[in-house]
Image (spheres, grey):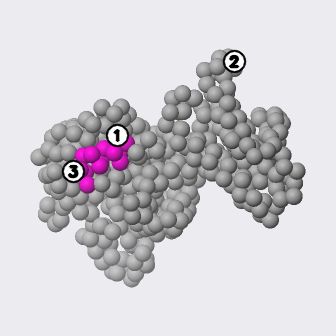
Amino acid sequence: MTGYFSSPFARRTSVGVHVGGVVVGGGAPVVVQSMTNTDTADIDQTVAQVAALHRAGSEIVRITVDRDESAAAVPRIRERLERLGINVPLVGDFHYIGHKLLADHPACAEALAKYRINPGNVGFKDKKDLQFAAIVEMAIRYDKPVRIGVNWGSLDQELLTRLMDENQRQGFPLTAQEVTREAIVQSAILSAEMAEEIGLAREKIILSAKVSGVQDLIAVYTELATRSNHALHLGLTEAGMGSKGIVASSAAMGILLQQGIGDTIRISLTPEPNGDRTREVQVSQELLQTMGFRQFVPIVAACPGCGRTTSTVFQELAQNIQADLRKNMPVWREKYPGVENLKVAVMGCIVNGPGESKHADIGISLPGTGETPTAPVFVDGRKSATLRGPSIAADFEKMVADYIEQRFGQHGKAAAE
């Protein structure tokens, strides 16, 4: 029976990279990051969104730096965030003219914690290597790490054409899709080698190779992981909207993470118009937490409901408790260390309710259709109380709050000692 209950794959060994105060790779926990969709030149909007992403749990935030006005705004954004007590590392996303913007705006170069370079559009023909080198030299000057971010939507066409021609001369042993995958991997590795030749240390380089197909992403990162020991940033580009984007990103990254591949992740969701940008942070956290790699917020287990649970009380209670826990986590992380490990169960009938509730730190088994209108509550595996009447939901919410205070508050820690 050996092997049936094995743990996830061992993490791939990678070189750790310090991005501001956050370590990516080198055995550090997988980092959650996100990206703003504001006009960076709009300082108020950008500060507000960075703050919201950070409060939601984003440990690194990337912002677009696409023109002089954006570059000039970066140090002011950094200053405003620091006045709010927010020290989240900011990453500058550069395309086409990053070399010029960094040279013309030294305060921007200093304020950023990392530069993102796309080798597919950093420059073209004779200018490509010179402009790539210019950004790398700026990173060396300001002691900043870089992410060499290959994206198949802007893949180096010279490299791709060369590999396609070589494949043709060999009688087409590889499909066009396979050649494209190889071009993505080579673009990342060759760019990293060039950066190191210029003088950028390996512990200053993170690689990414983003595509929009699940199988392509798995293939590209699996190969990249075997051919380098750089820290890897996982992400499925153009994942899409709603459940499609969530499922695609989770399927691809879940497989890679289970194999120990990936040091930081971003789940790129296309938001609804005026939608909540923090959703991508929440989904990233839920992926890592569901797979058992990290804990961010307390888990609320709830049954899906069936013919025995025609009432919506258990659904509403589970939703309210989960929303309340997530809303309070920014404060509770400081006030109640360890609260992210809390497990709450909200069950809808007698079939699995008591058993699931006993497995949680605190759980309630609400009455199903035709059952006695009482709700036993279990605390630390033992029946603690039986709730009745119209205030069952409110009473249980108070019990959860009291449990958190008693277990994770100063009084609870002192009693444990």
Q: Amino acid at mark 3?
A: Ala
Of 3 and 410, nearer the camera is 410
The answer to whether residue 47 is magenta is: yes
- What is the distance, in whole Å, between disc 3 and disc 2 at their CAs? 52 Å
Residue ID at (56%, 50%): 286
Numbered badge on residue 41: 3
Give the farthest residue toward the left.
104
List the residue tagged with mark 2: 415
- What is the distance, in whole Å, between disc 3 and disc 1 at their CAs? 18 Å
Residue 149 is situated, as x and y percent measured from the top left of the image, at 33, 56
Q: Label 1, secondary structure: give it.
A: loop
Q: Label 3, secondary structure: give it.
A: loop
Nearest-to-viewer mark from 3 and 1: 3
Q: Is residue 149 left or right of residue 359?
A: left
Q: Are marks 3 and 2 in contact (CB under 8 Å)?
A: no
The answer to whether residue 29 is magenta is: no
> What secondary structure is the stretch in magenta mostly built from?
helix
- The magenta-colored residue range is 39-51
Numbered badge on residue 89: 1
Of 138 and 14, nearer the camera is 138
Residue ID at (83%, 39%): 386
